[in-house]
Amino acid sequence: MTIRLMVSIAALPGKGGELAKLRAPRAAEVRLEPGCEQFELFQSTENPDQLVLLEKWTDEASLAAHSKRNQERPQVGTELRAGASVMERYVTE
């Protein structure tokens, strides 16, 4: 079962581009993790302070391993965010 996550991230006013650039190295790092099929951050063309992270994982085990690694790494760009992220989770057979 493939797992797809869509994570909406709101940046502080005028900080969307800066947040996207700051998170780019982390995204490249995550793409190398076992089971990661997609990990891309997009910036809205209509509202540059709105970002969306699209993730695709081969299975629950690879996503769980990623989540565990995330708990051990420092957060990136939290000072540029306007509130908490909103995550939607989807699965395919």
Image (tube, grey):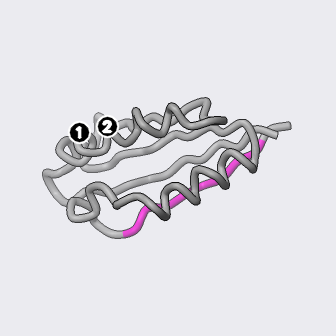
Residue 37 relative to residue 75: left or right = right
Q: Nearer the viewer, residue 4 or 43?
A: 4
Question: What secondary structure characterizes most of the magenta part?
Answer: strand
Q: Quadrant of residue 1?
A: top right
Q: From the viewer's perspective, is 89 left or right of 69? A: right
Q: Secondary structure at mark 2?
A: helix
Q: Looking at numbered disc 1 in the image, what kind of residue is underneath it?
A: Lys
Residue 12 within the segment the image draws in magenta: no
Q: Which mark is residue 24?
A: 2
Mark 1 is surrounded, within 10 Å at the Cα level, by few (under 14), some (14 to 19) or many (20 or more) other residues, namely few
Residue type (three-letter) at the residue carrying disc 2: Ala
Q: Position of residue 59 (x, y in %)?
A: 75, 42
**Disc 1 to disc 2: CB gap under 8 Å:** yes
Q: On the picture, is 74 further left or further right than 15? A: right
Residue on which the image places disc 1: 21
User: What is the magenta range?
Assistant: 84-91
